[in-house]
Each structure stands twice: as C-alpha cells, then as structure tokens.
Amino acid sequence: SQEGKVDGQPIILGGKNLTAQTFDLFVEFKFMCPRPSAKYSLDDLKNLLEFVRHFQCSACMLSFVTSCIIKRAYFFHPSELVYLGIKYKIRAIFERGFTRLCEVPLTKIKKSHRVRMGMDTYVAYVYVRSHLDEYIRTVAAEFPPIVHSSSCQDHKGCAEDWAAVWWNGMGRLLLDGRNPRRLDEAIDHFKGLQFGRVGVDCKRHMFSHIMNLNKPLAHSHQFITRVKDRLVHKIIPT
C-alpha cells in the first residue's frame, strides 16, 4: 500500500475532533518541545484527550494532557471536568471537578450542567451541598466560646461583644442571600471586623488557637473528600 508514502494517498484519520490542528499538536508533543499549558486553548486540550484515547497514545502523553487540564481547571466549568473525567476514565480530572462543583450553590446549577455530570454525580453533589449548607447555618449561629487572656479586665463585656460580632459578622457573611461567602473567605473577612470590648489579647488568642485551626473548613474538606472517594470508586473503577 502507498498510503502515507505519497501526498496523493494520505492516511485518513477518523473521528470528528481529529483535525489537522490536533495532529499538529500531537507531533509537537512527540517530536518537539510541548508548549506551556497556558498556551493551549480549552478545545485543544479536549481534542488532545480524544486523540490520545482514539489512537491509544502513551501514558506519558496522557499524563501531560491531564496535567495541562488540571493546571487550567478554573477555566472549565466543574461539571465539564466531571464529564471529561468520566468519559476518559481519568480520576484526577474527575476529582478536581467534583471538589470544585461542591463549592457551587445549588441555584447556580443549570439543566445542562446536570446532564453533563450524570445522575450519580448530581445526586452526590446535592447530598454534599445539603449537608454543607446545614453545617454553615450551624457555624453561623453557634459562636465558639471566648477564651479570655490573663490580661482581660472585662470578661462579661468581652464575651458579649465576641458573640455579637460573630452573629452579625460571620452570620451575615455566611448567610447573605445575594452573596454568601465561602467559609475560608468569611473567616478572613471576619478577622478584619471591629470587635468592640473584646480584649486585644483575647482576640489574638481566639484567632491563633481557634480560628486558625479552621475547624469548619477542615470539616467541609473532609466531608467532600469522603463522598468524592466513594463516588470515584463507583464511577471510575480501577
């Protein structure tokens, strides 16, 4: 056969996304120096994933394309990362997408997002969001008890103002109907508020020994991780 040996008889590559541009990117990766991840468009990366699967390319190339997508994860909607992870059976992409998905309020999820992520992922996402929303309401309402420093001269006033600032500050930040803050954002903003009669040393103690532990944030991460690990084993088995 003369296919591929002369210009008049090219090798025909099948697949709707296997364009000459995608093949050029493959040649660039295989025989030259790949460009930095930021230099690839999102379509380039998705087409390269399809190319890798279609032609069963090396694990090295799959790892490179995966790393580029991970580095540019914030340019994709989380549901699209979930979709790509499932379609190409790449756990790292799925896990990044699901973690980011859990940060998105339920009201921001459209029908197209639900279809793209699939029913199993959507059910898990709703379960996580429901739990986290309930937990956030608890965090907003239940302030951590003040631990007074040895220099505090007004325990009663200090405790009252600490509770008031927590409810009016952290509560509003977390439960704002128009612009609710994430836990980490709320904690950072909370530290910059005015604390009234709360002693300087008491506030410093609370920030260093309680707030900086980020217990609410750690709880959220742990819960998401547990659900994500179970889900990925179900959807993308090894």
Image (cartoon, rainbow, N blue to C red):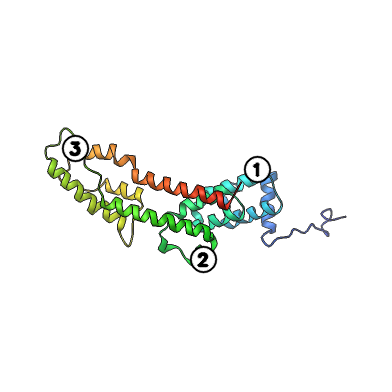
Q: Could you tell me which secondary element the residue under label 3 belongs to?
A: loop
Residue at x 57% of width, y 53% of height: 235
Q: Is residue 226 left or right of residue 167?
A: right
Q: What mark, if any, has residue 148 been given in the picture?
A: 3
Q: Position of residue 136 (x, y in %)?
A: 33, 53
Query: What's the amino acid at mark 2?
Result: Ser
Q: How many dots with numbers?
A: 3
For marks 3 and 1 on the same chain, the one whose residue lies earlier in the sequence:
1
Front-most of residues 76 and 80? 80
Q: Quadrant of residue 199?
A: top left
Q: Which mark sits nearer the N-terminus, 3 or 2?
A: 2
Look at label 3 and name its amino acid: His
Q: Residue at x 65, y 45 (%)?
A: 61
Which residue is identified by label 1?
Answer: 60
Dot 2 corresponds to which residue? 112
- Where residue 92 appears, as percent x and y from the top left, is 55, 47
Cα–Cα span, label 3 and label 1:
57 Å
Which residue occupies 61% across, 44% down?
63
Q: Nearer the viewer, residue 16 or 113?
A: 113
The Cα–Cα distance between marks 2 and 1, rounded to whole angstroms, is: 33 Å
Q: Is residue 47 left or right of residue 101?
A: right
User: Residue farthest to the right?
Assistant: 1
Tell me the mark number nearer the camera, choosing from 2 and 1: 2
**Classed neighbour count for the residue bearing mark 2: other residues with Cα under 10 Å, few (<14), some (14–19), many (≥20):** few
> Do labels 3 and 2 touch, CB within 8 Å?
no
